[in-house]
Image (cartoon, helix red, strand yellow):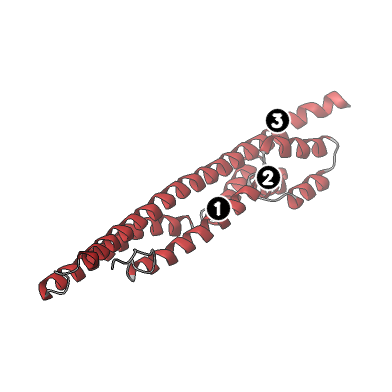
Amino acid sequence: MSSRFSFPFDAGPFVWLLLILAFLALVFVVERAMFLHRGLVLSSDFIEGVRNNLRAGRPLEALAACEESPGPVPRVVKAALLRSASGEDAMRAAATEAALLELPVLERRLGTIASIGRVAPLLGLAGAIFSGFNLTTALRDGSVYASANALLLEVQAALATAGFAMVIAAACAMAHHFLVGRVRSIVTEMEIAAHSIITFVRHELPEEKPRQS
């Protein structure tokens, strides 16, 4: 009587390690995706609001808008505005420093996701090797000569473990690529926002004031 292969129960001990890694990767990817989505503020809309406050002579409202808006872009703009009286170089230095402080927060757990993607195939290979070892041991002892079903179960366990590991590795690679793209988009938004607000405060705003008066 043949027994049906049941995944993951018949796949061996390594598949449980892979399931734990898959769960951790899923949690990290979802958390990072939600965090980076909240942090992606369109710099054009945000900067226009800050500009309107500065044009109206309301610098405190501009700073308040930076504090109330989520994400790293408003914090970079706020750092630049706080040094607006010290000159353009000081504003750029403050914006660069604030952006550098934001990078570790944006890149958090990305390395862990990539590591899971690299470790999973190794665990899958180890599981397949152990299944092959069990098979050869059983063949040597003569315990599976009369049962092709037992032999096939070990082969299925090896293939299932290796295949599941490949799926985890591929999913982690795609998720890592997606999240890195999100981080790069936020970094670009920070650069655009910092350059825009510095140019406005140091060059455009002084030219607008005489025209308004």
The percent coordinates of residue 161 (x first, y second) are: 32, 61
Q: In this view, does 195 lie to the left or right of 181?
A: right
Confirm whether residue 50 shows in the render: yes
Q: What element carries label 2?
A: helix
Residue position marked by numbered label 2 in the rendering: 77
Give the crowd class for mark 2: few <14, some 14-19, many >=20 residues within 10 Å: many
Within 10 Å of disc 1 (Cα), the crowding (few <14, some 14-19, many 20+) is many
Q: What element carries label 3?
A: helix
Q: Disc 2 marks which amino acid?
A: Val
Q: How far apart are marks 3 and 2 (CA)?
A: 16 Å
Front label number (1 vs 3): 1
87 or 98: which is nearer to us?
A: 98
Identify the disc placed on residue 106: 1
- Give residue 175's position: percent from left, percent from top: 47, 49
Q: What residue type is labelled 3?
A: His
Q: Are marks 3 and 2 in contact (CB under 8 Å)?
A: no
Can you say whether 74 is above or below 140 in the image? above
Q: Which residue has dot 3 on it?
A: 203
Q: Which of 146 and 92 is in front in this view?
A: 146
Residue placed furthest toward the front: 1
Q: From the viewer's perspective, is the residue at label 3 or at label 2 nearer?
A: 2
Disc 1 marks a residue whose amino acid type is Leu
Percent across and percent down for residue 32 are 56, 54
